[in-house]
Amino acid sequence: MKAAEFTLHRPHRIEEAVDLLAHHGEDAKVLAGGQSLLPIMNMRLAEPAHLIDITGIDALHEVAESPASITYGALTPHMAFEHGLVADAAGGLLRTAAAGIGYPAIRNRGTLGGSVAHADSSAEWPVVLSALGATVHTVSPRGPAVIGVRDLILGFFTTALAPDEIIVAVEVPRLPAGSRWGFHKTARKPGEFAQSIAVAVHRPDSEQLWLGAAGDTPIRIHPDSDPLEAIGHHGDYTRAIHAVTVRRALEATREAHA
């Protein structure tokens, strides 16, 4: 099966893309890497009449560094983190997470902003960015806005983005000296969607432990609590997978990464 007929738009400025999205409303979809949207369109699960290809907007490819954080353009591909083409604000955590996303072809085309906007609970970026306290920068006809990733993701494939709002960048706070992190993904084989993802981030003054693929949104687990209490009702096999994934992420923090 192939996608239904649509009109393709290729804006070269953020403002132009926002205007197109606002004009066409629910009949339009934004195309970034296309690794999630295009398969859905081919299966006719989504049939937008207008596709707004934002890959020609130079500003969405930019990366800006400051002492406190790094702001990655929404079109930064997964492979840029994997191969160290951009600085890693989390001392290697972003690189490790990116290397496990799908297959090389997907990592070459898929983007950071597209993954966050897609809000797949089995994906790496939503849970990793939640653990790091990252924010997304958006633009709409009402102007720019900044939203925490934890507040952005409302449910499975559901975000707080307005229909005419576009993610333009993702800002990740730098991990301070003395921080440690642990990451573990459980999947049936490399390249497949996660059965469980756990991210542990230990800063000198705080701890974060987050679990992905266990619910509609990333789940925060208090380090001193039983992780099985946080994931709700699952079968014994699934609960055991999540428990082991969390344990391995915590074990990985014994090595100093940042």
Image (cartoon, rainbow, N blue to C red):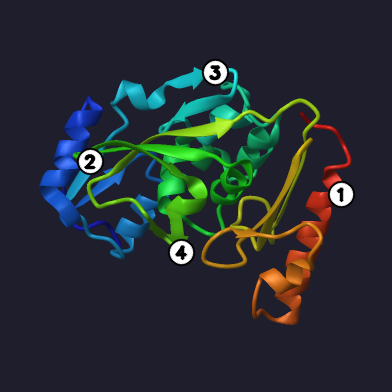
Judged from the image, the secondary structure of the residue bearing numbered disc 2 is strand
Closer to the camera in the image, 198 or 152: 152
Binning the other alpha carbons within 10 Å of mark 2 as few (below 14), some (14 to 19) or many (20 upward) gives many
| Residue of label 3 | 66
Name the quadrant of the N terminus: bottom left
Q: Which mark is residue 48?
A: none
In the image, which disc is placed on residue 52? 2
SS type, badge 4: loop
Give the number of the mark in front: 1 or 2.
1
Mark carried by residue 156:
4
Q: Are marks 3 and 1 in contact (CB under 8 Å)?
A: no
**What amino acid type is highlighted by mark number 2?**
Ile
Q: Residue at x 61, y 56 (%)?
A: 192
The numbered mark, 3 or 4, whose residue comes first in the sequence reads 3
Q: CA distance from mark 3 to mark 1?
A: 31 Å
**Tag 3: amino acid:** Ser
Q: Earlier in the sequence, mark 1 or mark 4?
A: 4
Q: Which residue is mark 1?
A: 251
